[in-house]
Amino acid sequence: MDLPKRAGDAPLAVELEEGKRYSWCTCGLSENQPFCDGKHRGSGMEPKMMIAEKSGTHYLCTCKLTGNPGFCDGSHKN
Ligand code: FES
């Protein structure tokens, strides 16, 4: 299987808490998008650890094409 797998065609709006760590799924296999659920194991890919800089709604990438890992940069439209 070619990875990363496209896990969605639009970002997911999620509430993040300032200073809290999150693991963003880079492989696209997680069933808990946009976060890692461990399904990357054995794929050679690892989740991207991110710390929220501020609390509030953030739009996280599901297409896995973003140039700003974790955050939607509009690449899903390409
Ligand atoms: S399940 Fe995709 S990076 Fe962990």
Image (cartoon, rainbow, N blue to C red):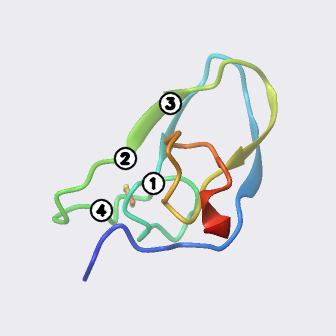
Residue 34 versus residue 1: which sits nearer the camera?
1
Gap between marks 2 and 1, in whole Å? 5 Å
Residue that numbered label 3 is attached to: 50
Gap between marks 2 and 4, in whole Å? 8 Å
Q: Earlier in the sequence, mark 3 or mark 4?
A: 4
Gap between marks 2 and 3, in whole Å? 9 Å
Specify whether tag 2 is near ligand 1 (CB below 8 Å): yes
Question: In percent of the image, x 75 and y 19: which residue is there?
Answer: 54
**Amino acid beneath label 1:** Cys
Residue that numbered label 2 is attached to: 47
**Amino acid beneath label 2:** Pro
**Amino acid beneath label 3:** Met
The outermost residue toward the bottom is 1
Q: Earlier in the sequence, mark 1 or mark 4?
A: 1
Q: Quadrant of ligand 1?
A: bottom left
For the residues labelled 1 and 4, say whether their Cβ atoms are less than 8 Å apart. Answer: yes
For the residues labelled 2 and 1, say whether their Cβ atoms are less than 8 Å apart. Answer: yes
Residue 77 picture quarter: bottom right
Residue that numbered label 1 is attached to: 25
Q: Earlier in the sequence, mark 1 or mark 3?
A: 1
Gap between marks 1 and 4, in whole Å? 8 Å
Question: In percent of the image, x 40 and y 40: which residue is there?
Answer: 48
The outermost residue toward the right is 56
Residue that numbered label 4 is attached to: 40
**Amino acid beneath label 4:** His
Disc 1 residue crowd, few under 14, some 14–19, many 20+, Cα 10 Å: many
For the residues labelled 2 and 4, say whether their Cβ atoms are less than 8 Å apart. Answer: yes
Gap between marks 3 and 4, in whole Å? 17 Å
Specify whether tag 4 is near ligand 1 (CB below 8 Å): yes
